[in-house]
Image: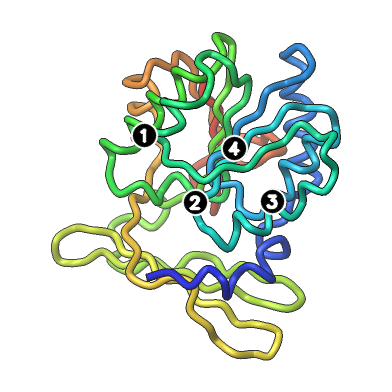
Amino acid sequence: MKSIKNLVEYYDELFPVTEEQKSFYKALVQKYHSPVHFLRYGCGTGIFESNLAKEGHDVTAVENEQDLLKCANLRRRNQLMSIRFFQMTYQDMGKYLAKNFYNIISVLNSRIIFFPDRETILDFLQTCRTILSQDGTIVLQLMNFEKYGDQKLIQLPTRESVRSRLFTEILSDQEGRCIMSCNIENSSEKILPVMNDVKVYPLVPDEIESLAEEAGFSTVEFYSGFDKAEFTGSEDSYVVMLS
């Protein structure tokens, strides 16, 4: 069960676009001719995509949570910007988006773990491979689930802003499924549900490498963050580039 509407007001505060992220992508776009073609899966409120479009890039973004998608579309006030937001499955991406077109595909804020199993994630990466340009790059940003080992209950680091706090935990049930629950403490100090008993698949680095190879990628680069510092395995999160 999801109650994403309780998160929308605070989304941009809890999942901010950092200066390191902006610098990371500014360096990455230098590999490609302008306009660079971006695709984001799980774009949230679309604030980062709007910034990219203002810089002259061609941007497509997918978001399947209606409350977040509505906010994203409200940002499209300047019709001269080359940006579009869609609600579609990853299978629809493969059917309706142009083949070999996108230079950079991003899945940030651990959104890739909301695919239910390894096979679906592999299918998603294979779909992305068909719409990615020959020299294209996939950027993934994930929490480092490997550091929790075999814990049955994982309490992820709390996301905080001036007005809110987001609490997230993942519970492994008796059947081996991983179930996520999130609650937000709002500006009135009231605890509200965001999602409850949502199945996730917490990827770990070794599995990402094997999935990337199966999907046809030849290079997998791990970093501790958008500053491209070395990933040691002890960090709370990391960034991966597939090409």
Q: Which mark is residue 40?
A: 4
Q: Could you tell me the amino acid type at mark 4? A: Arg
- Quadrant hosting residue 159: bottom right
Residue drawn where x is 85% and y is 43% of the image: 78
How far apart are the two marked residues, 3 and 2, measured between alpha carbons?
13 Å
Kindly check if marks 1 and 2 are in contact, taking CB atoms under 8 A apart as contact. Answer: no
Residue 206, numbered circle? 1
Q: Nearer the viewer, mark 3 or mark 4?
A: 3
Q: Give, as a three-letter code, the residue at label 2.
A: Asn
How far apart are the alpha carbons under marks 1 and 3? 37 Å
Q: The disc labelled 1 sits on which kind of residue?
A: Asp
Nearest to the observer: residue 32 or residue 63: 63
Q: Is residue 1 above or below residue 99?
A: below
The residue located at (68%, 58%) in the rendering is: 71
Q: Label 2, on which residue?
A: 64
- Do labels 2 and 4 touch, CB within 8 Å? no
| Identity, as a three-letter code, of the amino acid under mark 3 | Asn
Circles 3 and 2: CB distance less than 8 Å?
Answer: no
Q: Earlier in the sequence, mark 3 or mark 4?
A: 4
Instruction: Kindly identify which numbered label has been placed on residue 73.
Output: 3
Crowdedness of circle 4 by 10 Å Cα count: few (<14), some, many (20+)? Answer: many
From the viewer's perspective, is 119 left or right of 99?
Answer: left
